[in-house]
Image (cartoon, rainbow, N blue to C red):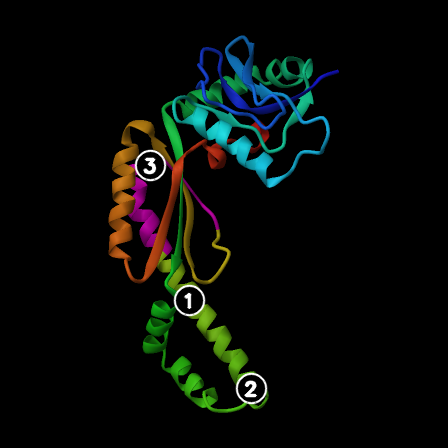
Amino acid sequence: MTATYVYGLVGAGAQLPDDLTGLGPSGKVSTIVHRDVAAIVGDVPADRPLGTRDDLLAHEAVVDTVASSTAVLPMRFPAVVEEEGVVEELLAPHHDRFVTALGELEGRVQYTLKGRYEQDVVLREVLEADPEIRQLQAEVRDLPEDATYHQRLRLGELVVGALEERRDTEAEQLVTRLEPYAVGVVEHHPGQPDDVVHAAFLVERERAQEFEDAVEEQGEQLHGRARLRLLGPLAPYDFVPGDEQ
């Protein structure tokens, strides 16, 4: 049996870009078609296990490049099946569901927005706005750490709480301003208190520039307080139903 790597799924009539390079030793990427749906496939390294960062980047590069021109359902990394199983176990049993999902994503791409506060600026804002934090900071400023352990612990808790409250409010406002430019939004909980936002937006391809301009406008309004980072257009990783991956 021949192992085959599956990057994602597209409509049967989709044309793959010419410059795709897969993660296998040949680098070749092609499709296996079954009725109205096709699997984007390639070969698999035979001399090592999959799972390196380069493998992941190659996987994402293939599906993101395909997504720039056609609807794609990205498979969860790493997806390896026997060549005979691509049709028998993947495409044939789930054909109708895949076709429906691809139809819902037609003409749409994902953008992922991340943002992080300029820590010194926002901490200064927190200090100015909270008398209790200012008082605790003044109490511990010139004293040894071991003599002010509990005060410093309380100070840290107050600062983190204030940052999270500020972040939640501003993230909600930011997403609300961008929602009109998207057909779907998935919000992720930020990993750190000074992370402002982590959200995925499903955007009509024809409105991509309009959405990018709206994000740039929000970035200008936050200039000096936070830095926004927009990734995309990407394959719709956050908008694929869990059992499709």
Amino acid type, mark 3: Ala
Q: In this view, does 76 lie above or below 40?
A: below
Residue at the image position 49 percent from the left and 34 percent from the top: 237
What is the distance, in whole Å, between disc 2 and disc 1 at their CAs?
A: 23 Å
Residue at the image position 27 percent from the left and 35 percent from the top: 209
State which quarter of the image contains the C terminus.
Answer: top right
Amino acid type, mark 1: Leu
Residue with the mark numbered 1: 163
Between disc 2 and disc 1, the foreground one is 2
Residue lying furthest right in this view?
1
Q: Look at the image and give the residue range highlighted in magenta.
A: 171-188
Residue with the mark numbered 3: 182
Q: In this view, does 22 lie above or below 138?
A: above
Q: Is residue 153 above or below residue 146?
A: above
Crowd tier of the residue under label 1, counting other residues whose Cα lies within 10 Å: few below 14, some 14–19, many 20 or above = many
Indicate the position of residue 112 as horizontal and vertical percent values: 41, 42
Foreground residue among 100 and 66: 66
Q: Residues at badges 3 and 1 in contact (C-beta under 8 Å)?
A: no
Q: Does the magenta stretch include residue 187?
A: yes
Amino acid type, mark 2: Glu
Label 2 secondary element: loop
Residue at the image position 42 percent from the left and 66 percent from the top: 163
What is the distance, in whole Å, between disc 3 and disc 1 at their CAs?
A: 28 Å
